[in-house]
Image: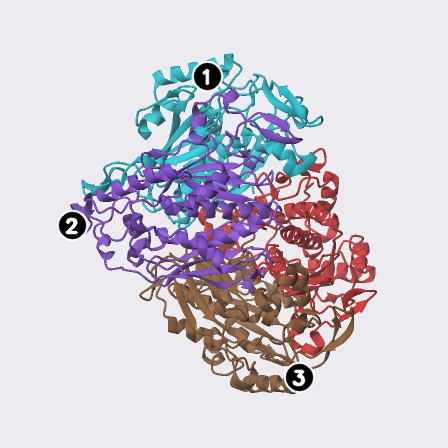
Chain colours: A red, B brown, C cyan, D purple
Amino acid sequence: MNTIGASLRLTIFGSSHGPGVGCVLDGVPAGIEIDRDDIQREVDLRRPSGALGTPRAEEDRVELLAGVMEGVTTGAPVVLFIANRDTDSSKYERFRVVPRPGHADLTQMKKYGDSVDLRGGGQFSGRMTAPMVAAGAVAKEMLRTIGVQIAAYTQRLGSIEDEEDRTLREARRQARENPVRAADPEIALSMINEIMEAKLDGDSVGGVVRCLAVGLPIGVGEPFFDSLEGELAKMMFAIPGVKGIEFGAGFRAASMRGSEHNDSFLVKDGEIHTVTNNAGGVLGGLSNGMPLDLRVAFKPTASIPKEQRSIDLERMEDTTIKVEGRHDPCIVPRAVIVVEAAVALVLADLCLRGDFIA
Amino acid sequence: MNTIGASLRLTIFGSSHGPGVGCVLDGVPAGIEIDRDDIQREVDLRRPSGALGTPRAEEDRVELLAGVMEGVTTGAPVVLFIANRDTDSSKYERFRVVPRPGHADLTQMKKYGDSVDLRGGGQFSGRMTAPMVAAGAVAKEMLRTIGVQIAAYTQRLGSIEDEEDRTLREARRQARENPVRAADPEIALSMINEIMEAKLDGDSVGGVVRCLAVGLPIGVGEPFFDSLEGELAKMMFAIPGVKGIEFGAGFRAASMRGSEHNDSFLVKDGEIHTVTNNAGGVLGGLSNGMPLDLRVAFKPTASIPKEQRSIDLERMEDTTIKVEGRHDPCIVPRAVIVVEAAVALVLADLCLRGDFIA
Amino acid sequence: MNTIGASLRLTIFGSSHGPGVGCVLDGVPAGIEIDRDDIQREVDLRRPSGALGTPRAEEDRVELLAGVMEGVTTGAPVVLFIANRDTDSSKYERFRVVPRPGHADLTQMKKYGDSVDLRGGGQFSGRMTAPMVAAGAVAKEMLRTIGVQIAAYTQRLGSIEDEEDRTLREARRQARENPVRAADPEIALSMINEIMEAKLDGDSVGGVVRCLAVGLPIGVGEPFFDSLEGELAKMMFAIPGVKGIEFGAGFRAASMRGSEHNDSFLVKDGEIHTVTNNAGGVLGGLSNGMPLDLRVAFKPTASIPKEQRSIDLERMEDTTIKVEGRHDPCIVPRAVIVVEAAVALVLADLCLRGDFIA
Amino acid sequence: MNTIGASLRLTIFGSSHGPGVGCVLDGVPAGIEIDRDDIQREVDLRRPSGALGTPRAEEDRVELLAGVMEGVTTGAPVVLFIANRDTDSSKYERFRVVPRPGHADLTQMKKYGDSVDLRGGGQFSGRMTAPMVAAGAVAKEMLRTIGVQIAAYTQRLGSIEDEEDRTLREARRQARENPVRAADPEIALSMINEIMEAKLDGDSVGGVVRCLAVGLPIGVGEPFFDSLEGELAKMMFAIPGVKGIEFGAGFRAASMRGSEHNDSFLVKDGEIHTVTNNAGGVLGGLSNGMPLDLRVAFKPTASIPKEQRSIDLERMEDTTIKVEGRHDPCIVPRAVIVVEAAVALVLADLCLRGDFIA
């Protein structure tokens, strides 16, 4: 359903072209300081960046409907709402007849019948990630109280890959300074170029977001099914466009030998470390004290102006479609803050469950 | 916790060296025919294969403790139990002092304190997948009633990769005929060789399991968080050793353009198909009628006889460890049936939730 | 937490003196017709009735924030919001020092610390039942599609008891015609009198709400724990002031013999009935085809102007308190529609779970 | 479904005439001492008492299948199993044709079809409470670590009522000393007499169990829906035969005035108390530090040898039935330990959720 989490439960609601989008975040302890402006800043990072994004100009103003009194949480559910303003639903009726390749138009109609709201993707819209980011900002405040920090950046964008093993510090410092959220200014330029080229071709590109988290206590995650990796993966696939996730060495681990992949322990300054971090900070589904390290693959935006083959459902015959609407040639830069939020929400939930957050 | 699923709920219990391992499967409709021998056959596929696997010789006899009367489910929870027999716990106490690299010994002790059962990995043991396979056999029976078929095979094993785009039919026919569960006899030989070499070196190898499912109705999966991909991913990361999952083009999608990645629709014989299946059978988190196609990355077995660096927790100083126990040089072949079971359990749950199974 | 239900999940949010109160109702099938005015009418029935109720004058205007497009549900979560307007928080700070007898001021402060929102009872306020009633109106629409009808009425108010075995039809016809929601006009007058007398004394009275539901299919309820009675009871105790619930003969059954209590079956016009309904329509936790019949006991309003003994928490010494605010001398009449809503929400959830609603 | 609880999750399985009954208790912290003999002693208290009970002679031997290593919990799910031995299913096939009044035979067949297991009530059998009692014994151990004590006793049995306001100490001392679990030896004799008379008449009697708990910290319970009362009520209605529950003054509160019902606070020896306990230890759904006080109404046993009216489902005509099997003329004495277990399970769950148990 539209709820995720056990001790910190997020419920997402709304649709792209309805009155708005929002969420309920239940389980936030009383006494957490919440500044609406901080939440707004995070949500603003999800907004499209000039020429690189959709021309849909949403103000995305976050309203605090419940759970906060005088800037502090009360222990009751926190409710955040973002009104929709710049909606243009004129183009969506056609997709009931000619479904867009790479979109869920057809599957949604099969599942929900004619009452389904296809406008802007309805409840499958990328716009549903706006309240996720807002909720993630609250989760980050919760994590801050125990010293957990999270940072994501664009590691790959189409053919451009950042091959450096960036630290959280680098990611934090750089990624918010450029519109593609790259961890390096040079690479940022190449990535911007990659997007512009795709846009000129009426096409789109995909990419990979890498996310790091440090400061996690040891033992975050719950066996057998609510593992750190499992909970993160489930949350991540709720983000529209995600097609893969891996931790540490991930798919590369498949071609490694045990002696190469195992992260050896060592003692340094009286503390236990591992020499490498092929595990990505997770062993047996539990955090092991090393940085959490995950990578998320995004497919290229499905909506492209370029002509594509599709079908006419009324006549049951082949046809073509150009998806004209207002779409991003690449959603990866906007997804970086969404991945951060998703990670924050899962970590905060599991930290509550493991009593790491009081 | 140790429960997963909404309409079909699986609870796993037991530990590697306790009285046994088992599961409760709640939500199985009344009237499903369950043959203990069929379940046993699936569980037997998880057992180690001669020289390729651990010498631990478990009979793994499945007992039906509840939920089935005269070979038919009653609607009450189905309970399956597999007694442990060939346990040898002598070697595990040492890991409380010198934790094994790549294992959760240390993280478990931090989380649970001294009462934790480390013998054989305790509740983090790969042995917990035996009841998953047994439960998966029940889920497969449920799916059979609506015509869904599942088949997995070893696509990569260390440096050996099967680069063909196998069909479910090929996977089904071949994978159970060779001990590495490859979809091709030639490739099987190379993979066997790869394992034997690693074993000779006192080392281990990882690999990739690919799983296909056909016959799924359109619309399986629930927004926003209980997507087909999200639920599958969460279940998959419960399998010890999994470090990544991807659907369809997966991580390759990150470097594709939209026009290349989008699966165009076409009408063939009055039915809607897509030309390609880069989406892996999932759009918007819902099954789209094309074959479900996912890949799961397994790390190499962490327990290796080769000497590794570790630490002595009592003296807080560096030391080395050789993990002598009885371990598989590669768990991937045994994991193939586990991946199938995991997919079956998730699909059966989501099919119940979507009312595709009565 | 603040969520209840499995297939139909209600999440309540807000507080008495914050921006407003509202709810998310997830699991409503696509295609249900929702008229905002119908919801408003139900919510209006919860408002205080002139001299009998609190002078707090809330308009309680229901806004539909999500899940409905052109008067029909889309399958996405339905979100309802009711802004608070006439709040007066001036009197609540004192209760942090001198807690009100019969209220949760003290227990809330112990649980949540100083950040708790005590204004108007915060998230423990009776005002939280307003969104429950709104959600109940949606649940009633769902139940209407399968012919289920619900009606509640005030069966006891202080010393006045309605001893007749009213039918649903009687309850429906009468209870909305008088301010105390009695099923008989004569009894209504006595009940009004009872309230007025208590009010003159600066005191309050309790009462009993009886609720009937007809048209339920046989088999609604899920073993072992999600029984029809268990799910109804849990929901009912969320209504502030409820202290007891019973089904059919209820507590009277304790002094009956089996031969007297068992409802004998008989065939009438080719249909199976029972001669009596001591079971209250539930056998083995499942609906049995007879009318659902339950009674809910409400304690008298805790807030009374009359002087009561309390304590001064700062000085840790005895003191007295008069709770002046704006309170109902009896909440039972307003609770009648809340009980109806609670029953509707549980029945709709269980009907979805049992596939009685498509 | 067959699972209840959030942080402490109980899953019940088995059926009256299958291989056995059992449960999984997930969420038990590591390090709790569990003595199989202690659990056995509790389960033995549920067994029938000589002439007062059913002649079905079950040994009810509890087996620990998982979660305990060397007498201490490991943090993994605790699994308890009780094999069925003395089953006699010969008499149950007839109930498929002539359903027993007061039983769920007919409703079960409607819900599950012909595959349902009616033998001994199947999964609706009172026998399902045996694993509840076993699990309750584990929950009691958890509660003991924070000083919570629970005791229940038979307060009413048919026409015999114990009108004294017993303390937990009295209930504990007396109730296990007599076969009807009365808190007073004299009353016990009258209750025994009441049962024997009903038995001679081929009939049965109902009763009321009162349960007290002391030592609960303040603030146990979770708003809005997981209130202390709501969670207890839901669990209680899972016990076969329960038809009502009330807390403190309960239904009597309905005819009280606020000034009479409110429990005034007072300071005694520097601690806060209330003068009365009409709230039964719960305010706003949270424990308030006073003893938890609840009453549960049980209907008379439905299975009676006396002739009753029923119907022949094949001929769809009226008939009569005498339920000969092996049944208790009164289940209340056996239910006392079940109520205790149910209360323990809910309290342990809510104490975990509120971090009152580490």
Q: CA distance from mark 1 to mark 3?
A: 85 Å
Q: Determine whether C101 is above or below D305 in the image.
A: above
Q: Residues within 10 Å of mark 3 (few under 14, many from 20)?
A: some
Which residue: 31% across, 61% down?
A: D86
Q: Which residue ends up furthest to the front in the rendered image?
A: D186
User: Is the residue A192 above or below the residue A132 in the image?
Assistant: below
Q: Which residue is mark 1?
A: C195
Q: Is residue A321 left or right of residue C113?
A: left
Tag 3 residue: B202
Which residue carries the number 2 mark? D315
Secondary structure of the residue carrying tag 2 is: loop
Q: Amino acid at mark 3?
A: Gly
Residue nearest the observer in this picture, D105 or A302: D105
Residue B302 spot, x, y in % from top left: 65, 74
Tell me which amino acid carries mark 1: Ile
Q: Secondary structure at mark 1?
A: helix
CA–CA distance in space, label 3 to label 2: 74 Å
Q: Position of residue D293 (x, y in %)?
A: 49, 36
For residue D147, side relative to residue A261 (left or right): left
Amino acid tagged 2: Arg
Identify which residue, B184 or C85, lies in the foreground: C85
Residue placed most toward the observer, C93 or C25: C93
Chain name for mark 1: C
Chain letter behind tag 2? D
Quarter that holds the N terminus of chain C: top right
